Image (tube, rainbow, N blue to C red):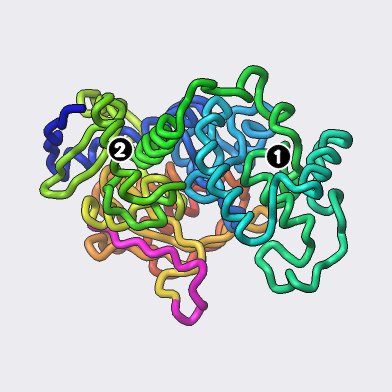
Amino acid sequence: MTARQPFTLAAGDARRLLVRYHFQAAPLEAVIRRLGTIQFDPLAPVGTNPDLVLQARVPGYRQGDWRHAAYERRLLVDGWDKQASLIQPAEWWAQAPFQRWFARRWQKHGVDVDAPEARALVEQVARHGPATSLELGDQRADPALRGSWYGPKRSRHLLKALWDAGHLMTHHRVGGRHAYDLPERVLPQGMGKGEASATQDDALQRLVVRRVQAAGLLRPTADAAVWSLPCQRGERDRIAARAVAQGELVELDVEGTRYWATPAVLSRLDEAPAPTGIGGVRFLAPLDPLMWDRGGVARLFGFDYVWEVYKPQELRRWGYYVLPVMWGERFVARFDAKCRQGTLTLLAWHWEPDIHPARLPEGLAEALQRAASAFVDYLGASRVVLPRGLGREARRAWQRAVH
């Protein structure tokens, strides 16, 4: 393998590239292929994380559409990537390193996915079809497991271990619970075996490339949480170098900072800007792939984002579930919101320091109104409750969004 010189890119070009890559409006199937993986999170004040990721990219998206795509059309399946995620079923083969890593970790905690009790659970699923942890295995509590993250039932620990190890998959969800089934009954026909000749390095390479693909541009030095992989960082760097040598990744130098990107992302540099959409306002998910590397976002966009959902209320500066607001190639605000029974309540709205609410930049109010109207439709809301601090033009934009 021969070393390749990093591709040099100015920060402004990097911002433009990311916006074009992420927010070129497209049908649901195309966005799924573009991102490759969407992080799952069950919190849903204004829709779940998959909902919010997709509404920012798919025209006409409605809350919950991802469930139909995943559990009926099988365009996505539940897996593990950057934490719990939705991935494309054709990439199930690349999950093998995660599955082996999880099986070893569970075994260290006394849970063996090949033990007779685990095999009995798989056989129960095989006989009875999709079922949740409330219907499978021994429902008695184990005193030794009280206080555990997965609860006191040993059967629930076994089911989670079997899911992590790939012996069971999510057929659908009942509320937030997995309904477990056999992989061959969840994956579309012909996708269960995947890349039969794939090596461990092949699978790891796909995981690394997929992580970069979802983010668009990703720093090798991003936080460990961004790069959670079933290997050490040195091994990841070796795999990334292999991907660069094979043309699956490109190394970038953005004003002295090193990034990785895929060739598909770089191809967007030569595209003409879209006449609509890209220059509009969009509301991003806290776990949107663009927001994964918050240090990179701060460096490129000057936007310092902190997700405060797990902070005690008295320590929060911005709010519980705060969505970044992007206009064109810049972040202009963030807001905390919830939607209940058709009422969207904006609990707080914070403009960035360079935005003066009394006199918004030309075009921002109109773009905000279009985005607010689409957001209200996405949620199925019929009423909006607004906070102080919006300013007259932004308040009017939100008010018009429901009329």
Identify the residue at image location x=22%, y=55%: 299
The secondary structure that dominates the magenta segment is loop
Q: Position of residue 123 (x, y in %)?
A: 83, 38
Look at the image and tell me in which quarter the N terminus lies. Answer: top left
- Tag 2 residue: 240
Query: For mark 1, does the 10 Å Cα neighbourhood hold few (<14), some (14 to 19), or many (20 or more) residues?
Result: many
Residue 396 placed where, x, y %?
43, 55
Q: Residue at x 56, y 39 (%)?
A: 86
Q: Is residue 373 visible?
A: no
- Circle 1 is placed at which residue position? 168
168 in the magenta segment: no
| Bounds of the magenta segment | 302-315
Q: Which label belongs to residue 249?
A: none
**Image x and y of residue 384, in percent:** 56, 57
Residue 148 relative to residue 13: left or right: right
Tell me which residue sits at (42%, 29%) in the image.
Answer: 202
Frontmost residue, 363 versus 32:
32
Residue located at (72% from left, 46% from top): 178
Q: Amino acid at mark 1?
A: Leu
Residue type, mark 2 in image: Ala
Q: Could you tell me if the residues under marks 2 and 1 are in contact, i.e. CB atoms within 8 Å?
A: no
The outermost residue toward the bottom is 314
Residue 101, placed above or below residue 198: below
Between marks 2 and 1, how big is the CA–CA gap?
A: 30 Å
| Coordinates of residue 241 in the picture (x, y in percent) | 26, 36
* Secondary element type, mark 1: loop
Front residue (pair 361, 298)? 298
